[in-house]
Image (cartoon, rainbow, N blue to C red):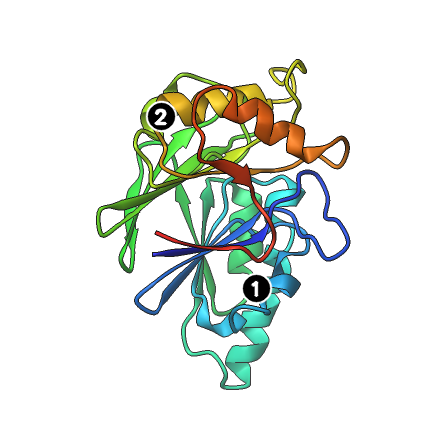
């Protein structure tokens, strides 16, 4: 299983730096996890858009889903041109408006999920945990060949995350704030929170994501590592991790 970081900035993209997007691949099957602002353009450096037929959206804040509208139109046009032969399957929390948006465009369909859901996408088994965030948001666990990727998406810290991410081979944890800041009101984690999660879950490799647009990002890594897990690094657009 491979994970390509397409984008990892929180709130809004940087120049040549998209928001949340992760390309998961195994044995010719590709799954896009989140499709935030700037993701669709960057994604084409690594794969033809027509070769991805499954997109999982963790929630409906713009930095996690805004490029999905363009993706729907891409599938419509490319199917009409004979370049795509499968519909685009979009998965996300139940939302009538989003479902109508997706299904209003030909060659796309919408499937909702909640924390009781479990479904397979090719070789990937997907499960979900409800987060603490101002809108309905989910962490996602993807298991393939006894290897696991856990993506927290946006959330403030909760002990439930420790069990959900337990012994994950790759933990992609949000790290929106620096140590000493308060993330509870905004539904985000600090570097210390992310480090505690990484250590107590015994994650084998950890990426800090949903990064802030200010401060020294290396301070996030130092703070997180100080909690006990030494296998922590910043996510970077374009990085490829083999699991």
Q: Quadrant of the N terminus?
A: bottom left
In the picture provided, is 71 more to the left or to the right than 241? right
Please provide percent x and percent y for residue 94: 46, 40
Q: Which residue is mark 2?
A: 201
Q: CA distance from mark 1 to mark 2?
A: 37 Å
Residue under circle 1? 72
Q: Is residue 24 left or right of residue 223?
A: left
Closer to the camera, 92 or 96? 92
Residue at the outermost left position:
146
Q: Is residue 202 left or right of residue 155?
A: left
Contact, mark 1 vs mark 2 (Cβ under 8 Å): no
Residue 189 x/y as whole percent: 57, 23
Q: SS for tag 1?
A: helix
Q: Is residue 134 visible?
A: no
Tell me the quarter of the picture where residue 68 sits.
bottom right
Q: Residue at x 45, y 17 (%)?
A: 158
The answer to whether residue 46 of the structure is visible from this angle is yes
């Amino acid at each position: 299983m491979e994970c390509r970081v397409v984008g990892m900035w929180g709130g809004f993209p940087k120049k040549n730096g998209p928001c949340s997007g992760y390309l998961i691949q195994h044995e010719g099957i590709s799954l896009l996890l989140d499709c935030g602002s700037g993701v669709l353009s960057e994604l084409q450096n690594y794969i033809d858009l027509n070769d991805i037929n499954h997109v999982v959206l963790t929630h409906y804040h713009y930095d996690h889903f805004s490029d999905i509208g363009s993706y729907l139109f891409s599938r419509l046009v490319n199917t009409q041109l004979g370049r795509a032969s499968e519909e685009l399957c979009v998965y996300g929390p139940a939302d009538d408006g989003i479902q109508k948006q997706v299904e209003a465009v030909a060659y796309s369909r919408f499937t909702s999920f909640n924390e009781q859901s479990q479904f397979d996408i090719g070789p990937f088994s997907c499960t979900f945990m409800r987060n603490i965030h101002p809108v309905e948001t989910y962490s996602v666990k993807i298991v393939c060949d006894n290897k696991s990727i856990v993506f927290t998406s946006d959330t403030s810290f909760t002990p439930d995350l420790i069990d959900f991410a337990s012994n994950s081979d790759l933990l992609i944890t949000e790290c929106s704030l620096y140590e000493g800041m308060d993330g509870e009101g905004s539904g985000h984690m600090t570097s210390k929170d992310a480090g505690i999660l990484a250590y107590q879950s015994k994650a084998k490799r950890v990426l800090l994501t949903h990064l802030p647009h200010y401060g020294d990002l290396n301070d996030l890594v130092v703070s997180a590592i100080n909690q006990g897990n030494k296998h922590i690094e910043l996510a970077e657009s374009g990085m490829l991790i083999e699991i």
